[in-house]
Image: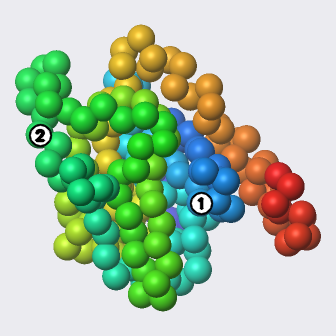
Amino acid sequence: MAEGSRDFPSVVDRYFTRWYKADVKGKQCEDFCILQHSNRICVITLADCHPVLQSGKTISSINYQISANCSRLQNKVSGKSKRGAQFLTELAPLCRITCNDGDEYTIYSCIRGRLLEVNENILHNPGLLKEKPSSDGYIAVVLPKFEESKTITKDLLSQKQYEELLLKRTSLPTNDLSEM
């Protein structure tokens, strides 16, 4: 470290707890990171080992139109009680990412709660997903129900558990990954 310079923890590192959902819907390495703030708000992001971030793919489009009748962009939240927010289950799709090679990835909520906002900035600048996945490149912000806020992490991996999973993945022969 150069004299006079210091490494300060980022805002994310200081104020958020990282939780992970691995192999969502059985898709190998399609992992998501949930950043949970002490006020119970959760920010949904891609985990560092997600194929979109790992394989040098170029993102061609991001679409928050989930079905003919459901667009996450139409989510209009108002007031203290967050009226109008779409309610999400753990496997509710948030958006779809399409890469230049034709691969498509569905991004899921991973937690139950109300959708407070989606990141419209990534629509105009998809590179943010790759450049700053834990900050400017987030997918969405979700608010769990108050009574569920302590239990939403029971099905998620802690940072330590996730690091152990990554070590197991790298130490296994490729054909053994499907058995995890």
Q: Disc 2 vs disc 1: Cβ atoms closer than 8 Å?
A: no
Q: How many marks do you count on the picture?
A: 2
Residue 160 vs 39, above or below: the answer is below
Q: Residues within 10 Å of mark 2 (few under 14, many from 20)?
A: some
User: Measuring 78% from the left and 48% from the top, which residue is drawn there?
Assistant: 164
Residue 111 visible somewhere in the drawing: yes
Residue 13 vs 86, above or below: the answer is below
What percent of the width, then of the height, locates residue 144?
38, 26
State left or right for residue 132 relative to residue 23.
left
Image quadrant holding the N terminus, namely bottom right
- Kind of residue indicated by mark 2: Lys
What percent of the width, then of the height, locates residue 2?
52, 69
The alpha-carbon separation of the residues under discs 2 and 1 comes to: 29 Å
Q: Nearer the viewer, residue 170 or 114?
A: 114
Q: Secondary structure at mark 1?
A: loop
Residue indicated by mark 1? 30
Q: Nearer the viewer, residue 22 or 164?
A: 22
Residue furthest to the left: 79
Q: Which mark is residue 76?
A: 2
- Kind of residue indicated by mark 1: Glu
User: Measuring 8% from the left and 24% from the top, which residue is drawn there?
Assistant: 79
Residue furthest to the front: 68
User: Measuring 64% from the left and 59% from the top, which residue is drawn there?
Assistant: 27
State left or right for residue 167 relative to residue 97.
right
What percent of the width, then of the height, locates residue 131?
40, 71
Q: Secondary structure at mark 2?
A: loop
Of callouts 2 and 1, the N-terminal one: 1
Q: Nearer the viewer, residue 140 or 70?
A: 70
Residue furthest to the bottom: 101
